[in-house]
Image (spheres, helix red, strand yellow):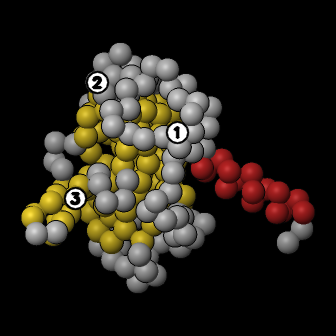
Amino acid sequence: MSFVKSLAVSVFMGALAAPAFAADIEIHDAYARTSTPTAKAGGAFFHIMNKSDQDDRLVAVSSDVAPRTELHTHKDMGDGVMKMMEVEEGFVIPAGGMHALERGGDHVMFMGLSEGFKEGETVSVTLTFENAGDITVDIPVDLERGADHKMDHGDMDHSKMDHGDMKHDDKSN
């Protein structure tokens, strides 16, 4: 691959990983994955930042990559059994705060895939918020990312964020 072509691919992939913004809602650190090349289901994970002074709610999600795309969470059924289930009421994004969609917790679920996602592809997803409206995000497929991946905080200003019980790796927060 030529240097120019390699550089163009690098710039393009970097742009896909960049945060998505719409008014006061920002989407950070997004990625999508399937567990195997033949998986019929997949997930998308990201952090939603709400920079407004009022709560918002992610109420719906849609995508052309699967016949069904839903907001999901894991529920403890007891005896060490976890069950994935749809969250019809959506997820509250607190004013000046964030909500994490992460593996093992709240997430976007793609069901009925004809094939698994491929590394380097993107998945276009439309997130519908009560106040902010629709935000379309092109989410890069990252099949290598582990469940213990730490959020890249970049240059986010954390001074007005309510992170609840969220833990951070760096001391700049």
Q: CA distance from mark 3 to mark 2?
A: 23 Å
Label 3: which secondary element: strand
Q: Taking the image as drawn, is residue 90 in sight?
A: yes
Question: Which residue lies most toward the right here?
Answer: 3
Label 2: which secondary element: loop
- Does residue 168 appear left or right of residue 12 in this picture? left
> How packed is label 3: few (under 14 Cα within 10 Å), some, or many (20 or more)?
some
**What residue is disc 2 on?**
55
* x and y, in percent, of residue 145 in the image: 52, 64
Which residue is at a point 47% across and 72% down the rendered structure image? 117
* Amino acid at dot 1: Ala
**What residue is disc 3 on?**
74
Question: Which residue lies most toward the left here?
Answer: 78
Which residue is at a point 38% across and 32% down the rendered structure image? 163
* Above or below: residue 94 compared with residue 150: above
> Disc 3 vs disc 1: Cβ atoms closer than 8 Å?
no
* x and y, in percent, of residue 143 in the image: 52, 70
* x and y, in percent, of residue 97 in the image: 38, 28
- Considering only order in the chain, which callout, 1 or 2, is on the residue closer to the N terminus? 1
* Amino acid at dot 3: His
Which residue is at a point 53% across and 29% down the rendered structure image? 173
* Above or below: residue 18 compared with residue 65: above
Q: Nearer the viewer, residue 29 or 6?
A: 29
